[in-house]
Every structure is written in structure tokens, then in C-alpha cells.
Image (cartoon, rainbow, N blue to C red):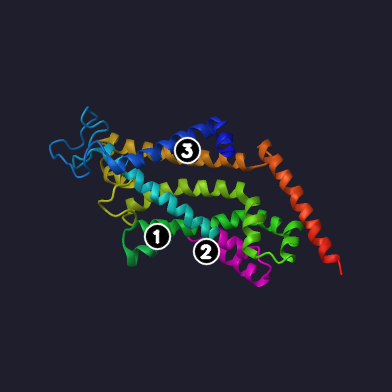
Amino acid sequence: MNVLKSIWAHAQGRYALIVLGAWMLIALVSLLWTPHSLWDTDGYRVWAAPSRDHWLGTDGTGADVLSWLMAGSRTNLLIVVLTVGVAAVIGLLLIAAMVSNAAMLSGVTVVAVDALISIPTVLIALILAVPVGASIAVIVIACGLGYGLNLARVSRPQALLAARSDYVEAARAAGISPWRVLVSHIVPNTLPTMSVQLSLSAGTAVLAESGLTYLGIGVPSGVPSWGHSLATSVTFISLHPLTAFWPGLVVTGVVVALNLFGDALREAADPLANPALRQARLRQEKTRQLQSRQLQSKQVRP
């Protein structure tokens, strides 16, 4: 709750929360209601201008643009959530290997990440689309893998710094499991960096969905998405620019909101920028130092 208050305190944070909240609300509403059925087409009113019946006009099949954008919001929300989740899991696994005490495992992981991170996400998606075809899973796996590699590479310096701290060494000496050390001590120190990276991944996933769907290897035909709305209208953008303008405006607004949300979240999770969090971190640090001294005193006793 304190984090949300810190984000709301900034103008960019308010914009991000309002846009993202509206996105989630529209996605939920679209499950129950849209102005028109997605399959309600009118061949006599194709590429129609905005009117009382069709607030944002119609596309090349006479379908309501607003209804498709509303239905597409839940598809894009699903893609973003799954992509960020996959990227977070892959990133955490790689970070755990990078900060491992096993020198060989750590070195091999760093080399593997540096090698794999150079592979374009589009190429990964093309390889996956050969056996699977156009699918949401192609977008999630390709983007999740690429963004997870970036997450691990960017977060590695801070993770190593935390892994070599005194309280982490004391926790390992006390026999605490590596995963507990990772979750309790190492990950919290990398949260500001990870939050920004994951928010950028969320925004890039929205752009990737549009691009991959345009190439024919993203969201399957007939499934509503913002990329689908763009792909079906971009061919006639010079004749009917509004049909491409509306989905483009939605994608731009959401991507900007996701990026600003990451910046605001970083400031809220950064002790240097958030005084309340700084005080809480100082109290946690004193507690850890006290526990470290207690553990060391127990080890010194015969």
C-alpha cells in the first residue's frame, strides 16, 4: 500500500496507474459486454467513419473497431502477464546460477547468457512458429526467454554485490538453503532494477505482439488483439487512417504507461528516493547485523 501511495505521489505514476487500471477494467468488462458482437459484420458499412452506432468506426469487414479493441485488451493483458511471469522465472533461475558458489556453474551461466542474449526475439519466434504455427504461446515463450536473459544480465552486478555481503555469508554459514538466501537477501536488493526491467519487458511485449501478429506468427487469425486490429488496417492506412490510428493510440498509451510505471516503481522501491523505505531498510539492516553477530558468536564458542 505504501508503494502505491509513493507511485501516486508523482504525476507520471498517476498517469500510469490510471491507464493500467482502465486497461484492466476494460478487459474485465469485455468478458461480459462489448458494444457489438465481434462477428457482427456489415458489408455495406466497411471502413465507416465514427458514428453513434460505431463510436470508432468499422474495419474492412464492417466489424465494430471499438468492440475488437475492447476484446483485444484481454488478449494483450494475458500476453503481458504470462510474458512477465516467464521472464521473471527465467531471470531468477539465471541469477541464482550466476551468484552460485560453484565457480564453474556461475561462469558457464554468464557465458551462456552473453551468447543467447544476442539472438533476436523475432528469430526465436520464427523458429518456434515452424512446428506450432501462429500462437500466443510463441509470443510468450520467445519474449519471455529474451526478456529473462536481459533481466539476469542487468541484475547480475547488484545480485553479486548482495551475494558477497557479510550477512549473506553468515546466512550461508548458518546452513540456510540457497533458495532462501536468494529470496530473502539477494532478490530484495535487486528489486529496483528488476522492477524497471520487467516493466520495460511488459511494454515491449505489447509491441512484440503487434509486430509478430503482423508477420503472421503471433496471435492467430480470429483472436482479437491490438496487433490484429493494426495488421488488418495498416494496408489501407492511406485511405482510412482512423482504423489504424485507434489501435496505434491504444498501444502507444499503454506502452508509455508501463514504462512510466516501472520508473515510478523503481523510485518507490529505491531507499535513496523513498525516505519511508529507507528507514525500513535501515531497521532491517540493523536486525541483520545483529543476527550476523549472534551467528558468529555461536560459531566461535567451543
Element at label 1: helix
Total numbered circles:
3
* Closer to viewer: mark 3 or mark 2: 3
Question: What amino acid is labelled 1 in the image?
Answer: Ala
Disc 3 crowd, CA 10 A, few/some/many (<14, 14-19, 20+): many
Query: Is 81 part of what is drawn in magenta?
Result: no
Q: x and y percent of residue 275 in the render? A: 68, 36
Question: Magenta segment range?
Answer: 92-119
Q: Residue at x 61, y 46 (%)?
A: 192
Question: What amino acid is labelled 3 in the image?
Answer: Ala
Q: Is residue 257 left or right of residue 247?
A: right
Name the residue carrying label 2.
116
In the rendered structure, find residue 161 and report the number of the disc placed on it. Answer: none
The answer to which image quadrant residue 268 occupies is: top right
Question: What amino acid is labelled 2 in the image?
Answer: Leu
In the rendered structure, find residue 257 and report the number of the disc placed on it. Answer: 3
